Amino acid sequence: MATPSAVIARPVNSQPQEQIMIQLEGVEKVYRTERIETVALTNINLAVRAGEFISIMGPSGSGKSTLLNVIGLLDVPSGGKVAINNRPITSYSDRNLALVRNEEIGFIFQTFHLINDLSVVDNVEIPLLYRKGISGAERRKMALQALDRVGLHARVHHFPNQLSGGQQQRVAIARAIVGNPRILLADEPTGNLDSQMGDEIMDVLKHLSEQEKTTVVMVTHDPRQADKTERIVRLFDGRQVN
């Protein structure tokens, strides 16, 4: 497995280190049915700098995944304001939200969501299929570069079932960063891995944050991994407690 020093970096973004990439002000999220109202988030205020690596912790049902979905524009808040890269997106149309997600945000999940019938490089190319104006040759070049960045240049023609769990998660990270997003959202990225493989994935995420100035927001139940991030945001019953 590649060490962080072997990870090939993309050019560092030219944006200032202190630029705020994610800004939430008074964010609320309420789920309503005919009989039940469930408050998932209450008055969330959060600012995350460019290149910052933060973790979100809290017990089950505390609102961690809801918060990540709001940041990732997968869920619309019931109240408050959300800005991504200084763009207030609260009133964006579904089409414009989809464009921001595709261009600015990469997603990593606990389960790898790889397609077993496709090679590693073909899996990584998938997000680029939804971008206009990128040729097949350019998609392949970008996918190979992303795999280089996570230390998997020797596995590009393998299939997911030929890889270890840690390697499969690296493929998932390469797929998330292939379009050079400024923000990377990770939902329990080490949850299905043993401690050694989990540490390797954390090294990759830290490299992306520290060397490439990618903003990383990670949901985790693991305090050992959370302690490796720059800041921990704690939730309880949908509220910030720190």
Image (spheres, grey):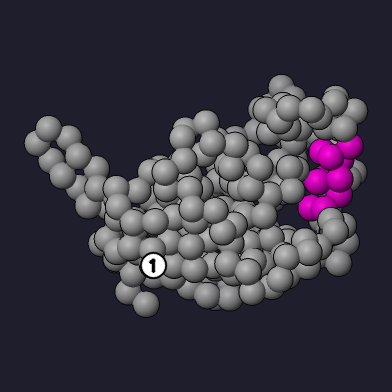
Q: Is residue 121 visible?
A: yes
Spot occupied by residue 58 in the image (x, y as percentages of width and height):
37, 65
Spot occupied by residue 215 in the image (x, y as percentages of width and height):
63, 62
Tell whether 149 sits left or right of 206.
right
Tell whether 114 sits left or right of 76.
right
What residue is at 59 percent from the left and 57 percent from the top?
85
Instruction: Out of 231 and 165, give the one closest to the viewer.
Output: 231
Instruction: Out of 97 and 60, give the one closest to the viewer.
Output: 97
Query: Split into 4 quadrants, where in the image is the C terminus?
Result: bottom left
Q: Is residue 98 above or below residue 192?
A: above
Q: Is residue 49 above or below residue 106?
A: below
- Label count reads 1
Tell whether 32 sits left or right of 78.
left
Dominant SS type (magenta) = helix
Q: Is residue 141 above or below residue 222?
A: above
What residue is at 30 percent from the left and 52 percent from the top?
79
